[in-house]
Image: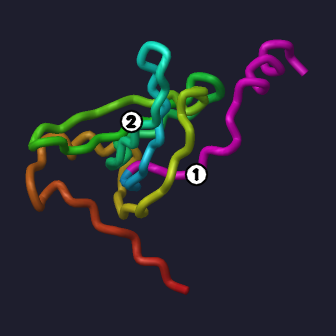
Amino acid sequence: MDIIKQIESEHLRLDIPEFKAGDTVKVHYRIVEGEKERIQVFQGAVLRRRRGTTNASFTVRKISDGVGVERVFPTNSPFIDNVEIVSEGKVRRSRIYYLRNLRGKAARIKSKQIWE
């Protein structure tokens, strides 16, 4: 095994669930303020998922007080406590940047029908 791949594999996180663009997720992120540490939940729609090994990341967008807030989370970050999938969205693209220009009801994402 290549030594670079071996070092990268030591830092990969395998506890992050599989999700894609359009899904609504809750990201429990650990925040350090001085000597105190707390967990902050960031819930929103996944705009994109950048795959890779150690440089993998995903972008989450939420509306806070009428203003759109986007945040990029590194997938393998030790500050991510856990990621919960709230709902699966039905989108036809891998990057849904068009959501930035939509307002109100037009910005909703249809949920995926699961037939059992």
Which corner quadrant of the image does residue 55 belong to? Answer: top right
Q: Position of residue 71 (x, y in %)?
A: 34, 31
Query: Which amino acid is tagged 2?
Result: Thr
Q: Nearer the viewer, residue 85 or 52?
A: 85
Which residue sits at x=61%, y=44%?
16
Number of numbered discs: 2
Which residue reaches farthest bottom? 116
**Quarter in which the N terminus is drawn:** top right
Q: Characterize the local packing of mark 2: few (<14), some (14-19) or many (20 or more) Cα atoms within 10 angstroms.
A: some
On screen, 76 above or below 61? above
Q: Residues within 10 Å of mark 1 (few under 14, many from 20)?
A: few
Quadrant housing the C terminus: bottom right
Pinpoint residue 72: horizontal percent, then vertical percent: 39, 29
What number is the disc on residue 105? none
* Closer to us: 60 or 30: 30
Instruction: Name the residue nearer the viewer: 108 or 51.
Output: 108
Q: Residue at x 59, y 51 (%)?
A: 17
Instruction: Name which residue lies at 38% across and 54% down.
Output: 24
Residue 18 numbered mark, or none: 1
How is the model colour-coded?
Answer: rainbow
- For marks 1 and 2, give the CA distance: 14 Å
Three-letter amino acid code of the residue under disc 1: Glu
Q: Secondary structure under badge 2?
A: strand
Q: Is residue 96 above or below residue 4?
A: below
Span colored in magenta: 1-21
Q: Which residue is mark 2?
A: 59
- Magenta run includes residue 7: yes
| Side of 83 relative to 111 (left or right) | right
Quarter location, residue 100: top left
Q: Is residue 86 magenta?
A: no
Q: Secondary structure at mark 1?
A: loop
Q: Are marks 1 and 2 in contact (CB under 8 Å)?
A: no
